[in-house]
Amino acid sequence: MGLLDSVLGSVLGGQQSANGGQGAGLAGFVGAPLRNPQLLQALAELLGNDGASGGLGGLLARFQKAGLGDIIGSWIAAGPNQAISGEQISQALGANTVADLAGKMGASSSDTASQLSQLLPGLIDQLTPAGEAPPAGLGNSKDLLGLLGGLLSRS
């Protein structure tokens, strides 16, 4: 199984892979929402170095400032991923960021935060296979969008 398949499987299996089990595949966990191009774009912008959030490093800083550094740290480190709620996502990212992403996705802020709470742990876990945040980040949003799209085409 390739890296992209592993990422998708983990993201789709999200909480299952956090407990050491194998994911059922991205489509099995998330289904249609992750096939939404607006959601893919939002994820790429959120994680990309060129995004408004400052990429993975920016997310780490936001989560730490919100007192949720241990949670995002568990997604990056080896071992189980800690769960996060939509409310905690909103707390960490800020209401304006969540509202902006929601607008791009054509969804409510609460739905967007909920979707992110299900997707980000497994996605970040799989994008940091060495158990630490890459010093140069995860790349720009265009590269990440291609990676996510490739992962989905294999699921």
Image (cartoon, rainbow, N blue to C red):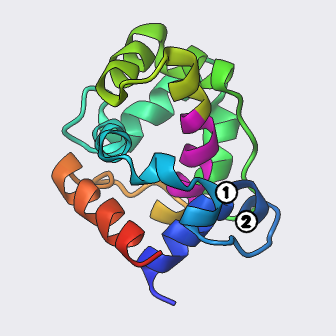
Contact flag, marks 1 and 2 (Cβ < 8 Å): yes
User: Which residue is painted at 68% across and 49% down in the image?
Assistant: 74
Q: Main secondary structure of the magenta part?
A: helix
Q: Identify whether 12 is placed above or below 95.
A: below
**From the viewer's perspective, is 39 left or right of 85?**
left
**From the viewer's perspective, is 59 left or right of 100?**
right
**From the viewer's perspective, is 88 left or right of 43?**
right
CA gap, disc 1 and disc 2 = 6 Å
Q: Identify whether 49 is placed above or below 108.
A: below
- Secondary structure beneath disc 1? helix
Q: Is residue 138 visible?
A: yes
Circle 2 residue: 17
Judge whether residue 121 is colored magenta.
yes
| Amino acid type at image mark 2 | Ser
Q: Could you say which quadrant of the image residue 113 lies in?
A: top right
Circle 1 residue: 14
